[in-house]
Image (tube, coloured by chain):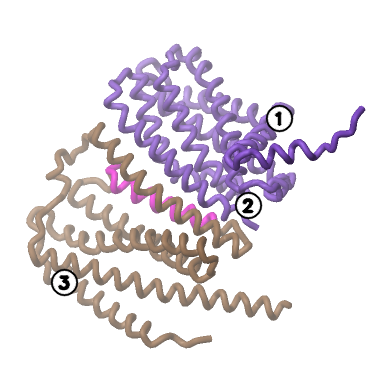
Amino acid sequence: MESRPRALTILDIATILLFIIAVGLVFFYAPMEAVMGQVQRVFYFHVANAWVGMLGFLVAAIAGVAFLRTSNRKWDIVGLAAIEISFVFFFIAIASGSIWARGSWGTWWTWDPRLTTSAIVELVYAAYFMLRQGIEDPDRRARFGAVYAVLSFISVPITFISIRIFRTIHPVILGIGSAGAEGSFDMTPKMLLTFMFSLLTFSFVFADLLWHRIRLGSLADQAENLKMKVLE
Amino acid sequence: MHTVPQTEKPLVTQKDASSAARFTHSVWAIVWKDLAAELRSRELLSSMLVFALLVILVFNFALELDAQARATITGGVLWVTFAFAGTLGLNRSMAVEKDRGCLDGLLLAPVDRSAIYFGKAAGNLIFMLIVEAIVLPVYSVLYNVNLFIPGLLAVILLGSVGYVAVGTLLSSMAVQTRTRDVLLPILLFPLVIPVLIAAVKASTGYLQGMLYADIQPWINLLIVYDVIFIAVAFMVFDYIVEE
């Protein structure tokens, strides 16, 4: 068994440092938003979390195509790792968005295109895990997982578009009124810097976790092979 | 009685036939097999149909479908009914293949794998359309609404095509898992949400006599979805049945 690669340790440290700086920027550097107040600070990590969620979805779809083309087990591990990480991050994005919405929209949830789509994405991820759980044969599990990752990656944007059309024909009449009241705001340069820095940090977090998870996946694979050898 | 070598004739025609004709032929053979089996057992259609009528009955009490409510939610009720009955049919049609080892037989046949997909999908589509063809008049009579609007029928066809295209693919995946019957709706519904949204909105549009210009985005969406997913299913089906 190979020991932990040096680059991974460096990445770990870099990610932790970036994360500490990002937290510092969010709380102490970024100015307080005039209308929404403190709750607006959720925004920086909220968008970054959603970004990681979508990134994982993309990585899983690419890994899915790669697996179907090459039948290399490595890609299956990558796909599963990406979706596992993104499932958690997307959930955090929804939860943090909900907290922000309570503060600025006055409601935990609305059936807005983005919110609805994100809920569907979580359900798709959940279905992906249930599909994998139901299959014992590792090769078939990998193939079906890859196919489902690709299918859902294609369907989610169509879902988003369809809900978008849905809303433009039938606008939602809620307490929030016009687009301006939805909580949009102009970012000051300081805010923009914090925001971009958060995106960068979370991309690092994603890469770091993905690497760890892929390593874990291949180690689990090796352990499984060894177990089979012992049984034989 | 003359003894003509029996194999000669079909062999010659098979060689002459273009590959497209052979493909259609194998698709048709699978559709025909499903129809013939169904004609004898009638287990799939009858269960789908009874289930569909029960769903409508449940809606009747759950939503109080009075005249006012019906105007706005008929489209939704119809599509939920079709979607639920559709899952039942999709599950059954693939489970039958798997349980009796028929799928292995199909895979051994010297035809293109995608012909199996299109054959099963066409069979499922026919069953779904038959159920819809019975549910629609029953609903019309029960609730005194005219559902025979050409546009609405076109929407139902387009929606069913999209639903079955994804459903057939996912049901062939679901039957090969441990939790098969439970798994299909969980896999299928998040992916067919665009079809359901578009079909419900377009159906409601036609029922309320909206202008075509208002309904068109939904029709377009249905067509786009159908085309994309038939193409994707065609590409990935090989990987699902590969052993």
Q: What is the magenta range?
A: A111-131
The amino acid type found where label 1 is placed reads Ala
Could you say whether the residue bearing mark 3 is in a helix, strand or loop? helix
**Circle nearer the viewer, 1 or 2:** 1
Q: Is residue B136 above or below residue A87?
A: above
> Where's residue A213, x and y in %?
44, 73
Give the residue at x 35% y 34%: B220
Colour chain A appears in? brown
C-alpha gap between disc 1 and disc 2: 24 Å
The purple-coloured chain is labelled B
> Where's residue B102, x and y in %?
72, 44
Would residue B26 be counted in the magenta stretch? Answer: no
Quarter of the image for residue B147 reads: top left
Give the residue at x 21% y 72%: A23
Main SS, magenta region, reads helix
Q: In this view, does A24 lie above or below B173?
A: below
Q: Which mark is residue B176?
A: 2
Q: Which mark is residue B140?
A: none
Residue located beneath label 3 in the image: A25
**Circle nearer the viewer, 2 or 3:** 2
Would residue A122 be counted in the magenta stretch? Answer: yes
> Where's residue B134, x and y in %?
56, 20
Asked if badge 1 and badge 3 are on a common chain, one would say: no
C-alpha gap between disc 2 and disc 3: 51 Å
| Left or right of residue B49, residue B166 in this image | left
Could you say whether the residue bearing mark 2 is in a helix, strand or loop? loop
Q: Which mark is residue B36?
A: 1
Quarter containing the N terminus of chain B: top right
| Left or right of residue B198, residue A100 in this image | left
C-alpha gap between disc 1 and disc 3: 70 Å
